[in-house]
Image (spheres, coloured by chain):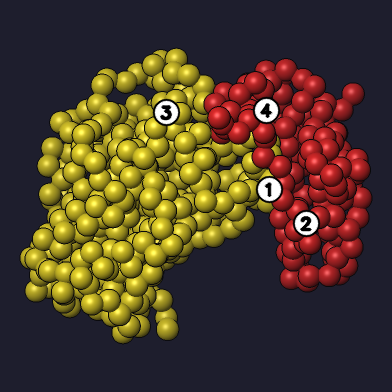
Amino acid sequence: MADVTKPIPSPTDATQPFWQGCSSGVLRLRRCSHCDRFRGPSRIVCECGQPDFVWTDASGRGNVFSYTVLHRAPDPAFRADLPYVVAVVALEEGPHLLGNLIECAPDSVSIGMRVRAVFETVAADIGVAKFAPLA
Amino acid sequence: MNEAAMHRKIAFAGVGEAKPSKTAVRSALDLAVEAALAALADAGLTTRDVDGVLTASPAGDPHFMFSTLVVEALGIPARVNTTLQSAGASPCIALLYGARAIMSGACHTVLVCESDSRGARFKGDKIQAMRAARPWTDDYEDPVGLTVPGKYALIAQRHMHRFGTRPEDLAAVAVAARRHAQRLPNAPRRDPLSVEAVLESPLVAAPLRALDCCPVLDWGGAVIVTTAERARDMRKSPVLLLGAGEGHGPYHPHEMPELPGSATRASGEAAFAMAGVRSQDIDVAEVFDAFTIAALVAMEELGFCEPGQGGSLFASGATALDGTIPVNTTGGMLTWGNAHIMVVPEAVRQLRGEAGINQVPNVELALAHGIGGPMAASCALVLGK
């Protein structure tokens, strides 16, 4: 019997505040203590070369930078969602995030579309950010 | 060491490929051995003449010491040996690192091979089978259901937004590849193909459709790298490495400031600088085309046309065998499966005049190119005589 549960993130000490933030409804990102820039979630060290940071809440607002509509699923757990949208969202604070775009028809999506983060808790202290059109 | 010192000092002395088969049962190791023996025979060498091995890591038969299995199977007295992993850029990167190892004096003759049994190993839905076999997870991509075609689709959608590229432009890449494949009797995909047929194939990850994606097949390829001096005494006239460059950036699409990243451009600029030539000087280009958008963007990033002009380059006939820059003269990965290493054996054959029915006349300079991860890593090699 195939596993039909969607994959969930596996938090580590380094990433747990991000996933926990998503489970409590905030987009929490590293903000550089030296240059003040927000870092993308996969960047431990700032592009300025400095590791020091403060976890800081971002607005969750941004616009669609690119997207794809998936018609073939990576595993059976996503089959019921087909077709679904995966977008790269450029946040107002600068970093880009990957997320499913929901609450809109796939053929209504366009690059530049304004979106806001919405959150789904997938396990204790683990949330996943999705995006929905900004009303 | 000044990297430019390797200009014309390194030769690709032998190339070989495992023969495609619909019925043979072969592991990635079997395919590597078959390709390696063909490359050694091409160079007029035995396994005892080789003292370095660099292999890519096969997805169909993952192993934590794949190159050592190759060393064992072939009985190679290796002084340099490891498995590299940069996905589709692995073979070109392995060839560059092999050249560096030879230049350093660590060894003198390196077998580079890449093979994969993914066609035989992955049954049913290939996307799902490959995901299930993947020996890692990704906290950002897996929970949202992103696939490899989906990652290339993010690049395609962005390209359409920035430059007005249309699905027809992507389809032109598949049609151009097929025209070359149709001339080859053993090509796995050789039915006539039209732009309309590509646009009618099922969507995989919009805007990419099934015929924008390469098939999932077995492959094996091997190249013998040695010094230009040693190559002079080998069986075939040597093909020389004139320039090589790699480019690297973030892995995840969401960490790239623009899609695609800058890896491909960086690799081309470095390779052309070392070779002392420009893209316009290249006579035949063998570029990564596991997806149509990859080849379209690669031709732009490597400087063969302006950004945004990749689609019209392929649609115009410029990439045909009699065009201004013939591209992927065997039909590429869109025909043969994502056998990333294939770009090098074909570039070598074109330079030797051994490319048969798809030979481009008077080839003096050839480019071979690989991309790893959706344009996260890239390596470009300029080859000449």
Residue B57 screen position, x and y as percent? 40, 56
* Residue A85 - label: 4
Q: Chain B hue?
A: yellow
Disc 2 target residue = A15
Left or right: where B27 falls relative to B293:
left
Q: Mark 2–mark 1 contact, CB under 8 Å?
A: yes
Q: Within the image, what quadrant is residue A64 found in?
A: top right
Looking at the image, residue B85 sits to the left or right of residue B328; the answer is right
**CA gap, disc 1 and disc 4:** 18 Å
> In the rendered structure, which amino acid carries the disc numbered 3?
Gly
Q: What element carries label 2?
A: loop
Q: Residue B372: x percent and y percent?
A: 48, 52
| Three-letter amino acid code at the position of disc 4 | Val
Q: Residue at image x 44%, y 25%?
A: B210
Badge 3 sits on which subunit?
A: B
Dot 1 alpha-carbon crowd within 10 angstroms: few under 14, some 14 to 19, many 20 or more = some
Q: Both on one chain, marks 2 and 3? A: no
**Amino acid, disc 1:** Asp
Q: Where is residue B175 in the image (x, y as percent from the top left)?
A: 34, 26
Which one is closest to the eye, mark 4 or mark 3?
3
Question: Could you say which chain is coloured red in the image?
Answer: A
- Residue at 33% across / 30% down in the picture? B176
Distance, label 2 to label 3, CA atoms, is: 35 Å
- Above or below, B194 against B5 in this view is above
Q: Nearer the viewer, residue A59 or B61?
A: B61
